[in-house]
């Protein structure tokens, strides 16, 4: 966070046009965001790999770069997202305006140069949420001073040099960048700024472990009583799970009243909390919550959720991407291959899977054995079923034995004519 994210690096990135972290590649999905314990991670990876290989055209989350994709644990997320390409866009425009202003000043067109520098000044001050933007502000102020002095506006040049000195005291105007008179003025202004009057400003924030940066210098966690040179400064406050606060501040001599800053929640943290709430209280809304999280966190290509029994004998693996969620995979120690009884995800399929998860096979076997141990033999259903079947068979056999054989009847016909 802060200076670790690189102050000068972003200047190079902006000038070269290199995409910043978070820009992503449209052709390659990002890694999965994993909700589960470290012990469940290998379970999820194995199950989804088997499922992906088994289905025609299927693929497990992350197997587009097998062996290289690092699954991100939701327990440690959202971390510092870095600087996105959209946040760097204004600073790239500042760099372009600076180049245009220098070209105009070289043609002695100070009016056009000052217009470009005014636009660059506004953009640079509005981009203070990016670590390193203070260096852009200082660079714009130095070029503004050089151009104003070239136009004969020495008072404006002195004011711009004073702002540059407070924003970036390490930057110096070199002899090759301006006339000797302007370089001498810059040296005097920077020297006076280093020993000028100070003001004290008590700063606090509503977020835990909020870190205060002034002119990209780390002043520690809030609350702090920050002492600064009188004049314009760049303030930035960062806290995990919140968007950075940034502003241009004016420090007066003496002590200012205490000020408490309210940091807006990070939309990614809100989306993560909404998904966890849906998983616990409203499974039917889980696909919508997963899509919202993936939209807020574009660095991820999918979401994988694992639920297990305490002994890890049985597990459920849920996977979601931008298209929605699939029915949970059922895994157990008794079967090597994962199964997916339901074809599509819905609240009923998750409820059935959780019921199966809460009743392991070992518990079913133990329960059946206990029932047999306490039930008398004459009260067991299968004993009476066997006796009934035996009685029916015996009756049928007895009837067959006692049945009478049919008799043959003879009839004698006497012809009266033969009796004579």
Image (cartoon, rainbow, N blue to C red):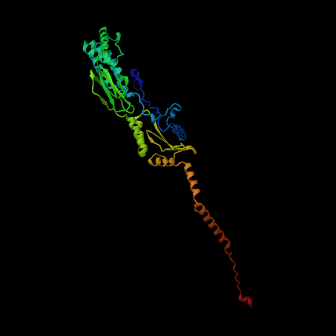
Screen quadrant of the N terminus: top left
Where is residue 95, by image quadrant? Answer: top left
Where residue 304 sits: x, y (%)? 47, 39
Report the residue at 42% width, 24% height from top.
Answer: 4
Residue 403: x and y, percent? 66, 74
Q: Is residue 157 left or right of residue 399?
A: left
Q: Is residue 411 above or below residue 65?
A: below
Identify the residue shown where x is 71% and y is 89%.
416
In which quadrant of the rendered view does residue 223 lie?
top left
Residue 21 image position (x, y, % from top left) = 42, 27
Task: Return the residue nearer the eye: 416 or 259.
Answer: 259
Q: Is residue 97 visible?
A: no
Instruction: Please name whichever residue, 253 or 271, is drawn nearer the observer in this view of the structure.
Output: 253
Q: Is residue 400 visible?
A: yes
Could you tell me which quadrant the C terminus lies in? bottom right
* Labels in figure, total: 0
Residue 11's place in the image compared with 284, above or below, is above
Q: Position of residue 168 (x, y in %)?
A: 35, 18
Say which of 181 and 90 sits in front. 181
Q: Classify 75 as above or below 331.
A: above
């Amino acid at each position: 966070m802060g200076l670790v994210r690189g102050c000068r690096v972003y200047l190079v990135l902006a000038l070269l046009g290199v995409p910043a972290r978070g820009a992503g590649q449209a052709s390659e999905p990002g890694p999965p965001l994993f909700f589960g314990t470290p012990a469940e991670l290998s379970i999820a990876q194995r199950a989804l790999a088997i499922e992906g290989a088994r289905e025609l055209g299927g693929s497990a989350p992350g197997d587009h770069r097998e062996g290289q994709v690092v699954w991100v644990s939701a327990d440690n997320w959202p971390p510092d997202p870095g600087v996105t390409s959209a946040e760097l866009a204004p600073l790239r425009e500042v760099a372009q305006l600076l180049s245009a202003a220098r070209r105009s000043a070289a043609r002695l067109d100070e009016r056009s140069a000052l217009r470009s520098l005014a636009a660059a000044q506004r953009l640079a001050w509005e981009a203070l949420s990016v670590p390193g933007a203070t260096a852009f502000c200082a660079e714009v102020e130095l070029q503004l001073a050089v151009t104003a002095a070239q136009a004969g506006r020495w008072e404006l040049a002195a004011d711009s040099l004073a702002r540059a000195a407070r924003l970036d005291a390490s930057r110096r105007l070199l002899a090759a960048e301006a006339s000797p008179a302007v370089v001498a003025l810059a040296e005097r202004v920077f020297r006076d700024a280093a020993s000028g009057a100070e003001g004290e400003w008590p700063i606090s924030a509503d977020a835990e472990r909020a870190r205060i940066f002034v002119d990209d210098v780390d002043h520690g966690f809030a609350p702090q009583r920050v002492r600064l040179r009188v004049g314009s400064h760049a303030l930035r406050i960062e806290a995990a799970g919140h968007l950075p606060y940034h502003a241009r501040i004016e420090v007066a001599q003496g002590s200012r009243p205490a000020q408490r800053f309210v940091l807006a929640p990070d939309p990614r943290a809100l989306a993560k909390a909404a998904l966890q709430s849906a998983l616990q209280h409203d499974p039917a809304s889980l696909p919508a919550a997963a899509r919202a999280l993936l939209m807020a966190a574009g660095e991820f290509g999918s979401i994988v959720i694992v639920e297990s029994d305490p002994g890890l004998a049985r597990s459920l693996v849920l996977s979601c991407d931008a298209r929605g969620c699939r029915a949970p995979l059922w895994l157990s120690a008794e079967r090597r291959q994962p199964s997916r009884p339901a074809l599509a995800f819905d609240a009923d399929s998750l409820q059935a899977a959780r019921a199966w998860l809460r009743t392991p096979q070992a518990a079913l076997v133990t329960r059946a054995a206990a029932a047999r141990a306490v039930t008398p033999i004459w009260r067991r259903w299968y004993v009476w079923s066997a006796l009934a079947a035996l009685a029916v068979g015996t009756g049928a056999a007895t009837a067959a034995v006692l049945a009478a054989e049919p008799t043959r009847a003879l009839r004698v016909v006497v012809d009266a004519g033969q009796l004579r």
